């Protein structure tokens, strides 16, 4: 009788262990099925305007109508482009690693110096000197100290329009400071960044509205209404002079633009 009970206890114990093991297998199978679903829960969203929004995009949650893609690379291959400030990342792996770099880089304008520099101490900062150099007529100053330019005659390289009031002008960084930071300037010394921000070759007198429309975008995302060949040529020249590192996709875009210009 005791032997039979012992056998029964063993059978019951084995039965319980089998049930536990089967439950584990069910949970494991469910986890395997759910895992890819969770991974695909955050697709790359391509809008009708062709912008590929990854989850890190500030517009991601607001984008409701979109074509989904599994990776950034697939979205770009379909003819899409990344949002402003996220350009140049060719694949989801590159994008993921680059987001870390961008977050860690913490771009701030002050990292290129406190503002327009007056390197020679004559009270004319680099904005004033750009206005003086680029005016086709003698400029007029605000007062006898000759520090601040108020009028002149500037032909905007972005439109060909004539501007005579300095207050209507922004001094454009042909290669934007944020763009430069994201493409190698984050590794420069403070002195080199300040020199870059005040380099006359990188400064153009243009309309306020167009400079602000351009923002931190490069030629792969934004081109002026006129003078596009001159703009791309100058941009590429500065990028090469300072050893900045555009992506292969950006390089190819610049080459295409310049080839079109040479026809």
Image: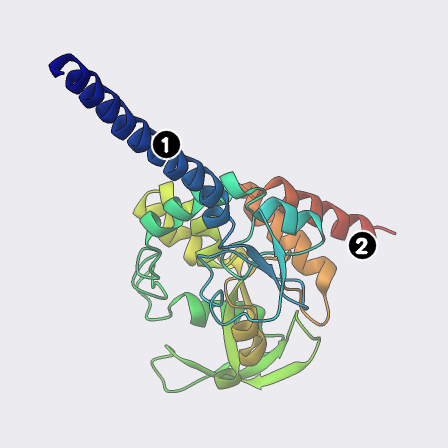
Per the image, the residue denoted by label 1 is 22
Which residue lies at the image location 29% right of the left edge and 27% below the top edge? 15
Q: Quadrant of the N terminus?
A: top left
Residue 239, relative to residue 228: is it above or below?
above
- 187, above or below 136, in the image: above
Residue most toward the right? Answer: 263
Residue 106, numbered label:
none
Residue at 44% over, 70% down: 127
**What is the x, y in percent for residue 39?**
47, 46
Residue nearer the viewer, 248 or 32: 32
Q: Which residue is tagged 2?
A: 261
User: Is the residue marked by circle 1 packed among few (<14), some (14-19), or many (20+) residues within 10 Å?
Assistant: few
Residue 59, percent across and down? 49, 68
Q: In the picture shown, does residue 229 fall above or below 35? A: below
Q: Nearer the viewer, residue 62 or 19?
A: 19
**Picture quadrant of residue 159:** bottom right
Q: Nearer the viewer, mark 2 or mark 1?
A: 1
The residue nearer to you, when weighing 71 against 42, is: 42
Q: Earlier in the sequence, mark 2 or mark 1?
A: 1
Residue that appears at 49% across and 58% down:
85
Q: Secondary structure at mark 2?
A: helix
Residue lying furthest top in this view?
3
Q: Position of residue 139 (x, y in %)?
A: 52, 80
20 left or right, relative to 60: left
Q: Residue at x 57, y 46 (%)?
A: 71
């Amino acid at each position: 009788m005791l032997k039979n009970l012992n056998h029964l206890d063993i059978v019951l114990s084995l039965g319980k262990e089998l049930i536990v093991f089967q439950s584990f297998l069910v949970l494991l199978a469910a986890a395997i099925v759910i895992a890819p679903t969770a991974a695909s829960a955050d697709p790359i969203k391509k809008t009708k305007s062709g912008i590929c929004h990854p989850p890190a995009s500030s517009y991601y949650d607001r984008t409701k109508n979109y074509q989904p893609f599994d990776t950034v690379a697939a979205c770009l291959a379909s003819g899409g482009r990344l949002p402003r400030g996220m350009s140049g990342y060719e694949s989801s792996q590159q994008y993921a690693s680059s987001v870390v770099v961008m977050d860690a880089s913490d771009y701030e304008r002050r990292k290129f110096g406190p503002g327009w520099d007056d390197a020679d101490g004559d009270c004319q900062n680099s904005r004033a000197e750009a206005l003086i150099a680029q005016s086709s007529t003698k400029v007029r100053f605000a007062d006898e100290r000759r520090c601040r330019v108020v009028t002149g005659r500037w032909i905007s390289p972005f439109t060909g329009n004539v501007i005579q009031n300095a207050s209507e002008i922004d001094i454009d960084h042909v290669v934007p400071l944020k763009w430069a930071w994201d493409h190698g300037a984050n590794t420069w010394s403070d002195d080199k960044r300040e020199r870059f921000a005040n380099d006359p070759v990188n400064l153009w007198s243009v309309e306020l509205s167009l400079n602000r429309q351009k923002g931190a975008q490069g030629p792969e995302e934004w081109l002026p209404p006129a003078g596009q060949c001159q703009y791309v040529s100058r941009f590429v020249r500065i990028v090469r002079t300072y050893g900045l590192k555009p992506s292969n996709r950006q390089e190819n875009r610049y080459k295409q633009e310049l080839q079109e210009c040479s026809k």
